[in-house]
Amino acid sequence: MKRSLLLLGSLFAFFGVAFGAFGAHGLKAILAPDMLAIFDTAVRYQIYHAFGIIIASFLAEEHRLAGTAGRLFGVGILLFSGSLYVLSLTGIRSFGIVTPFGGFCFLGGWYLLFLAAYKMQKER
């Protein structure tokens, strides 16, 4: 297991839960419904990919592609969720330009995780 990925995934999951609670309780009265929905999307994808990082951490020592997948998930969280957090809290739409790059990181991470699992299965 790659301990650094496990720590990163756990940290992202922790903050995902904290941001979700903050959005549900602290931002509900402040943000417009469309901005709150964007914030919720950021939280949801952060949590999903935090679990992806944790999964990758357990496979990273068996195949290097899994470690790369975990790192891509981390970059994806920063770009995708981070840009949506900033967009929803500031209303500055230009931050949305960054969001697709995070989505590509997510897709790349899942693809690499698939490849790692496939190669590990073939090697056994």
Image: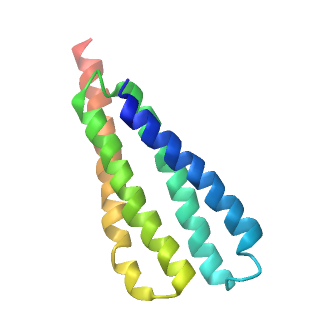
Among the 4 quarters of the image, the one containing residue 53: top left
Residue 4: x and y in percent read: 37, 35
Residue pictured at 38% horizontal, 23% vertical = 1
Quarter occupied by the C terminus = top left
For the image shown, how many numbered marks are present on the structure?
A: 0
Q: Is residue 35 above or below residue 84?
A: below
Residue 120: x and y in percent read: 27, 21
86 sits to left or right of 123: right
Identify the colour scheme used.
rainbow
Q: Is residue 54 above or below residue 39?
A: above
Residue pictured at 35% horizontal, 41% vertical = 70
59 sits to left or right of 55: left
Residue 2: x and y in percent read: 35, 28
Residue pictured at 55% horizontal, 50% vertical = 47
User: Can you name the residue that lies furthest to the top here?
Assistant: 124
Q: Is residue 1 above or below residue 40?
A: above
Residue 117: x and y in percent read: 32, 28
Depth check: 69 or 90 in front? 90
123 sits to left or right of 100: left
Residue pictured at 48% horizontal, 76% vertical = 86
37 sits to left or right of 9: right
